Amino acid sequence: MSEAQKNLKMRITGDVQGVGFREEAYWTARKLFVSGFIMNEPDGAVYIEAEGSEDALKALLAWCSEGPITAKVAHVDAEWSAARGKFTGFRIA
């Protein structure tokens, strides 16, 4: 029996733009077999919407709480829900 898929929306604030956050998160999501997207927000935050197994999404959330060494993550807002199956692959928007 396969694990139920989940949806995770995250908003990451701090020094997270212009420091390679999106690129590193992209490769982390790919390694975890997570689908969805990541994008910069106008206010300097980064937004991620991802779907995958709960364990994979928890691993992505943990990574986002730290980010790459060049970033300074201040806060991560996370919202969980059931997956809707609307993504194929993971992309940088």
Image: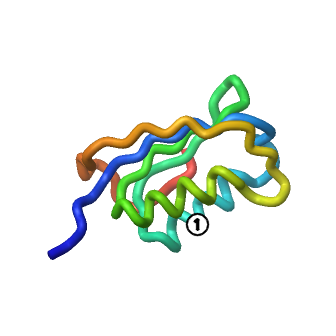
> Which residue is pictured at 54% across the width and 53% down the height?
61
> Which residue is pictured at 44% across the width and 58% down the height?
57
**How many numbered discs sit on the rendered protein?**
1
Q: Nearer the viewer, residue 61 or 15?
A: 61
At which x and y percent is residue 44?
A: 72, 30
At which x and y percent is residue 88?
A: 34, 58
Residue that carries the numbered disc 1 in the rendered image: 28
User: Where, quadrant-wise, is the C terminus in this rendering?
Assistant: top right
> Which residue is pictured at 58% across the width and 41% down the height?
39
Instruction: Please give left or right for residue 7 compared with residue 71 in the image.
Output: left
From the viewer's perspective, is residue 19 above or below residue 74? below
Quadrant assignment, res 28? bottom right
Q: Nearer the viewer, residue 26 or 8?
A: 8
At which x and y percent is residue 25?
A: 62, 58
Q: Which residue is outermost to the left?
A: 1
> Which residue is pictured at 70% across the width and 23% down the height?
43
User: Where, quadrant-wise, is the N terminus in this rendering?
Assistant: bottom left
At which x and y percent is residue 82?
A: 25, 46
**Residue type indicated by callout 1:** Thr
Q: Residues within 10 Å of mark 1 (few under 14, many from 20)?
A: some
